[in-house]
Image: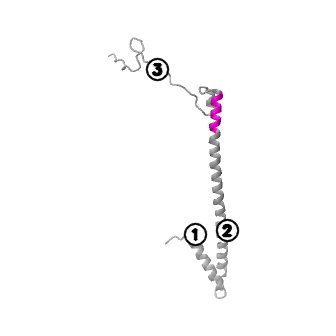
Amino acid sequence: MSRKTFAVIQKSLELKRAALAANREELPFLELPRQKVEAVLTELKDLTAQQASLTASKQEISKRIEDLHTEGMRLMTFVDAGVRQHYGTRSEKLVEFGRQPFRSQPRVRRVGADGKPLKPNSPPPPANE
């Protein structure tokens, strides 16, 4: 069984409605189905118009959401800069605003077996066995 598109079904219903209306006297027993076809077509057209309106509305809302998203990102950047300027980049108060304070890596000094610091690019001391 082949699937028909909405447009094909609607066109077919309109054709049948016109044929039923033209042959009303010859087909009185199909008066009730003709009225149902009229009702279905009327509601179908109304819903199609409503769908088009909602699609346009959805597009407008999507554009507005995008604009607000962009504005929100700009405001976040501005507020972050202001908070960092006020409290400083190392302040733990930044955590309250969802920002990570600058925490430098602790400086680890490598110490040799004699307890004296090693030079930065020297090889590690040999392991005693």
N-terminal-most mark, 1 or 3: 1
Q: What residue did someone put label 2 on? A: 46
Please provide percent x and percent y for residue 60: 65, 55
Residue 115, magenta (yes or no):
no
Label 1 SS: helix
Q: Front-most of 41 and 75?
A: 75
Circle on res. 22: none
Q: Among all residues in the image, which is located at the extreme top?
A: 114
In this rendering, is residue 25 above or below 94? below
Please provide percent x and percent y for residue 108: 46, 20
Q: How many neighbours does mark 1 have within 10 angstroms: few (below 14), some (14-19), or many (20 or more)?
A: few
Residue 82, magenta (yes or no):
yes
Q: Which residues are magenta?
A: 76-86
Q: Quadrant of the C terminus?
A: top left
Q: Amino acid at mark 2?
A: Asp
**Are dots 3 and 2 in contact, CB under 8 Å?**
no
N-terminal-most mark, 2 or 1: 1
Circle on res. 108: 3
Q: Front-most of 71 and 29?
A: 71
Q: What residue did someone put label 1 on? A: 6
Label 2 SS: helix
Q: Amino acid at mark 3?
A: Val
Q: How many neighbours does mark 3 have within 10 angstroms: few (below 14), some (14-19), or many (20 or more)?
A: few
Please provide percent x and percent y for residue 62: 63, 53
In this rendering, is residue 30 above or below 77? below
Label 3 SS: loop
Please provide percent x and percent y for residue 118: 40, 16
